[in-house]
Amino acid sequence: MHKSGFVNIIGRPNAGKSTLMNALVGERMSIITAKPQTTRHRIFGILTGEDFQIVFSDTPGAIEDPNYKMQEMMNRYVNTSFDDADLMIYLIDPQEEYSEDDMLVGKLRHSKFPLYLVFNKSDITEADTLNRLRKQFKKWLKPDRIYEISALKGDGVPELLADIVEMLPEGPQYFPEDQLTDRTERFFVSEIIREQILTQYHQEIPYSVEIDIESFQDTTTKDGAELARISALIYVSRKSQKPILIGKGGKAIKELGSQARKRMEDFLQRKVYLELHVKIKEDWRDDESALKRFGYER
């Protein structure tokens, strides 16, 4: 018997959803930084075994009060995860406070698919806090199972994965066995650039940029080694942000390009020649045509 299903991971920004999916799939599918609102799109990570296939879905963190149309579209990705789930994982950050009136709690209360409640960061959380949250969520929801894990360290992840495989319904193989995600290399290259911006810059800059891959060409070096030639545009939402991104004498963007190139070479498993340019697109986060171009209605 072959088992398969869609397992969707939801939670607040910075709860560790991307870290968990990467731990479950075994590949670095989603960018991971310590900053909230890192994931902006819905990303599939595909895990195929001898007699099963799991399609994990990493979603943006649910935003209670969106400030931009971009955040509204991010919430739509969260909403669509309620339409195709065979199993929902609600990832909880025990360091935060939760309420029965939270958006996700309300939506999950009326859902009919199996629900796994997963407390992340249990290795740095006091037992009293975990016990209190367990009682709260048992009162608010009726989870099928509850887990305490550390997605970053991998504690409890193998047990969670084994239980997911156990509960999968009988079903077909949806994707080829060697396919790891529904996204293209171009998408992950743009995510790597944004990851490095999140790491290198501060305050509003990381949340005001979007990446557009202008060209991605596979060629070879003079020595015959595989080479990816990549040109990317970094859009900023205000004129004042462009010189910050570039830095004095171009120092900041050179460092950004160097770190992004190294990550790309690890990910693509070939040499990379990377060009970065900065362009101003004022208020793109509220511009529907710009958002569509950047893939927010995918």
Image (spheres, rainbow, N blue to C red):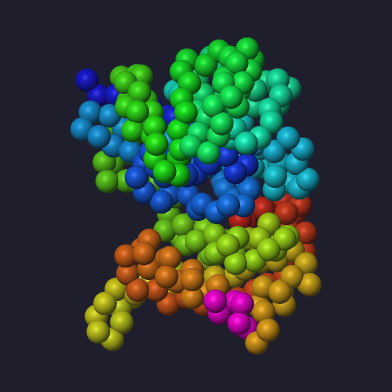
User: Residue at coordinates 57% horizontally, 21% vertically from top-left?
Assistant: 131
Picture quadrant where residue 139 is located: top right
User: Residue at coordinates 77% horizontally, 38% vertically from top-left?
Assistant: 65
Say if 107 sits above or below 80 in the image: above
Q: Nearer the viewer, residue 79 or 88?
A: 88
Picture quadrant where residue 60 is located: top right
Check the picture and name the quadrant holding the N terminus.
Answer: top left
Query: Is residue 41 visible in this depiction of the protein?
Result: yes
Main SS of residues in magenta: helix
The mark total stands at 0
Say if 42 sits above or below 103 in the image: below
252 drawn magenta: yes
Q: Nearer the viewer, residue 189 or 246?
A: 246
Left or right, 203 with respect to 28, comes to right
Relative image position of residue 185 (x, y in whole percent): 42, 58
Relative image position of residue 270 (x, y in whole percent): 32, 69
Check the picture and name the quadrant holding the C terminus.
Answer: top right
Left or right, 238 with respect to 149, comes to right
199 drawn magenta: no
User: Residue at coordinates 77% horizontally, 59% vertically from top-left?
Assistant: 283
Relative image position of residue 118 (x, y in whole percent): 50, 28
The residue stretch that appears in magenta? 250-255
Query: Is residue 141 visible in this depiction of the protein?
Result: no
